[in-house]
Image (cartoon, rainbow, N blue to C red):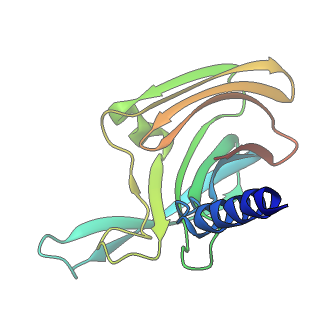
Amino acid sequence: MARGWFVFLAILVAGLVFSCHQKPPLQPKRYEYYTTYVTPYARLALTPRQDSSDVLPFTYYEYTTEPGDKLVFELVYEQGDSTHEDAGAAETAVFEIPDTATSFRIRDREFLAHQGLWIKTCFCFEPTANKARKIDSGNQVAGRQLTPFTWLIHSEIVGINFTDTIDIRTKNVVDRLK
């Protein structure tokens, strides 16, 4: 009988020791996803603005989508963590191509001819944050029409890096929870 109590006490003490051992903190839930929108029979209307709040003034743009003769692509990358402390961040690229195009490849300075803009949206204090700027060198996007409503898109614009098929009749989301 004494031996039974001894085994019971040993198991109880071992259980207490292991239960009080500090566990590593849980990693916050990270999210990242890409969303694509395509607006047919449209065009981008850009309004240049000047920002002088930084040491070096710069031009940024306000933009709207208006009726026109182009396809307007909007590619969005959002990421953050799902806790209430993180407001997350997003990068958006917009550009237009002729609505008769069945394929396209836009690189570097060619974005100027396609009204290409990039914006980083966040709760941050960088002077260029939340302001659309021209897409510059080192970026590219390509697309090929597979059916009248389906495109294969490959993007390498700043942080917007994905390859996917999209249906231009709907909002398309590629979800990547981590």
Q: Quadrant of the N terminus?
A: bottom right
Please state if 140 lies on the left or on the right of 59 as rendered.
Answer: right
101 or 126: nearer the eye? 126
Q: Is residue 147 above or below residue 47?
A: above
Of all residues shown, which one is farthest toward the bottom? 53
Residue depicted at x 70% and y 42%: 69
Quadrant position of residue 137:
top left
Residue 4 image position (x, y, % from top left): 82, 58
Residue 18 image position (x, y, % from top left): 61, 61
Quadrant position of residue 44:
bottom right
81 or 141: nearer the eye? 81
100 or 156: nearer the eye? 156
Residue depicted at x 66% and y 48%: 33
Of all residues shown, which one is farthest toward the front? 1
Please state if 100 lies on the left or on the right of 124 as rendered.
Answer: right
Residue depicted at x 79% and y 64%: 5
Residue depicted at x 81% and y 38%: 168
Residue 152 image position (x, y, % from top left): 71, 23
129 or 62: nearer the eye? 129
Q: Is residue 157 above or below residue 66?
A: above
